[in-house]
Image (cartoon, rainbow, N blue to C red):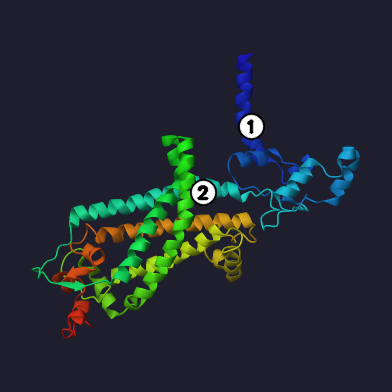
């Protein structure tokens, strides 16, 4: 008997896939519009399913009339019709809560969002941040610390005023706190619960969310301060091309002439302004949910321009439910933050252990004169009142 059951199970294992593949196109008609075996098999495989045959049934008056006698005093709509109407946002819902998302009771988008957070998003963070740290470590081991080549003079030049340093350190400290609390909120369930348990993680998660939400205002204020203070010095010019052509002397040789900020620092500045501004905007949409919608209109515009099809993709989803707006905002906020964090890793490295004398610029506000001549020769000549070198300024 056991052998017979085993043989039948084996036959079923091979028969089901072939049966699902060979079903005729109108096979669903035989089920009265319900799911068939092919739908079930595709759902188990994680494949995308066209469920319009279900969503089209919501709110169908003919279906409701046909079930009146069957359900008697329970009403004219069956439970499947009701739940489908709720799922596809086709039900006529009345609620005392007057918020944009109050009438959306079921929303499938949360599943792919959760899967992306727990899978691809975690890999992006590990590869991006871990890879950046690994590359910086290898660069340090191979190149070593960038030393001051000439003889130190013992004289210093004022590099940054107190207001500039305040804006920088406010931005830096708030970004570090936001980064730590953001990682706890994003990956804490996956990493911290197995290590410390649910109760400890619950405390850390609640505290992190409160700190993250409130420190964010300091970050946005600091972003405005550094933009106002340094935007004039970070406009591109011809000296940047020479600096980039020689990679700033990071791999050997003399450092190319530069003004107050070289091309590398300008790239970091505009990365902070653009990416930090994007993070702030998406953060505001998360702080004030359902009031700032960033993606629905953007997706609609991109679809009208035909950009997705230009890359061989389907149209971007539109319209979006309020919950979907929040989910896209959260993913965008996280991904852009991870990219900016990787850039800041490189900035921290060069501003500390990677380059001799660089930390003094923000630590003390003054730099060794010889350091200024080697790294920012054009700026040093201007500050010291020396005649400009025509070759360096072209």
**Can residue 122 be seen?**
yes
Q: Is residue 13 above or below residue 293?
A: above
Q: Residues within 10 Å of mark 1 (few under 14, many from 20)?
A: few
* Residue 54, image x, y percentages: 74, 47
Q: Is residue 234 above or below residue 86?
A: below
* Residue 261, image x, y percentages: 28, 73
* Location of residue 356 by image quarter: bottom left
Query: Which disc number belongs to residue 94?
Result: none
Query: Which disc number belongs to residue 116?
Result: 2
Residue placed furthest toward the front: 162
Q: Residues within 10 Å of mark 2 (few under 14, many from 20)?
A: some
**Residue 64 left/right relative to 261:** right
Q: Residue shown at 87%/49% (left/top)?
A: 62
Q: Are marks 2 and 1 in contact (CB under 8 Å)?
A: no
Q: Which tag, 2 or 1, sits closer to the chain's start?
A: 1
**Quarter the C terminus occupies:** bottom left
Query: Which disc number belongs to residue 15?
Result: 1
What is the distance, in whole Å, between disc 2 and disc 1 at their CAs? 33 Å
* Location of residue 292 by image quarter: bottom right
């Amino acid at each position: 008997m056991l052998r017979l059951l085993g043989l039948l199970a084996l036959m079923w294992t091979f028969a089901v896939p072939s049966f699902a593949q060979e079903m005729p196109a109108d096979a669903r008609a035989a089920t009265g519009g319900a799911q068939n075996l092919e739908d079930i098999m595709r759902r188990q495989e994680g494949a995308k399913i066209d469920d319009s045959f279900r969503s089209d049934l919501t709110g169908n008056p003919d279906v409701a009339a046909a079930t009146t006698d069957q359900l008697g005093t329970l009403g004219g709509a069956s439970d499947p019709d009701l739940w489908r109407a709720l799922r596809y946002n086709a039900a006529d819902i009345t609620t005392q809560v007057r918020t944009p998302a109050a009438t959306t009771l079921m929303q499938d988008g949360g599943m792919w969002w959760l899967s992306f957070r727990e899978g691809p998003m975690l890999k992006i963070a590990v590869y991006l941040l871990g890879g950046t740290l690994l590359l910086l470590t290898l660069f340090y081991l191979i190149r070593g610390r960038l030393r001051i080549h000439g003889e130190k003079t013992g004289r210093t030049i004022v590099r940054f005023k107190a207001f500039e340093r305040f804006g920088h350190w406010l931005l830096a400290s708030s970004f570090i706190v936001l980064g730590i609390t953001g990682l706890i909120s994003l990956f804490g369930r996956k990493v911290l619960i197995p290590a410390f348990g649910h109760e400890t993680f619950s405390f850390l998660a609640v505290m992190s969310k409160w700190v993250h939400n409130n420190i964010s205002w300091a970050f946005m204020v600091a972003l405005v301060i550094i933009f106002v203070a340094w935007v004039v010095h970070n406009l591109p010019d011809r000296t940047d091309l020479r600096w980039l052509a020689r990679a700033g002397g990071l791999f050997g040789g003399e450092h190319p002439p530069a003004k107050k900020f070289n091309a590398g620092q300008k790239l970091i500045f505009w990365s902070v302004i653009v990416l930090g501004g994007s993070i702030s905007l998406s953060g505001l949409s998360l702080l004030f949910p359902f009031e700032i919608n960033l993606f629905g209109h953007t997706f609609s515009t991109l679809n009208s321009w035909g950009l997705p099809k230009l890359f061989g993709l389907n149209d971007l989803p539109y319209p979006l439910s309020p919950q979907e707006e929040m989910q896209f905002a959260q993913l965008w906020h996280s991904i852009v933050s991870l990219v900016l964090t990787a850039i800041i890793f490189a900035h921290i490295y060069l501003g500390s252990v990677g380059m001799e004398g660089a930390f003094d610029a923000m630590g003390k506000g003054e730099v060794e004169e010889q350091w200024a001549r080697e790294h920012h020769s054009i700026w040093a000549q201007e500050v010291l009142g020396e005649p400009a070198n025509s070759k360096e300024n072209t």
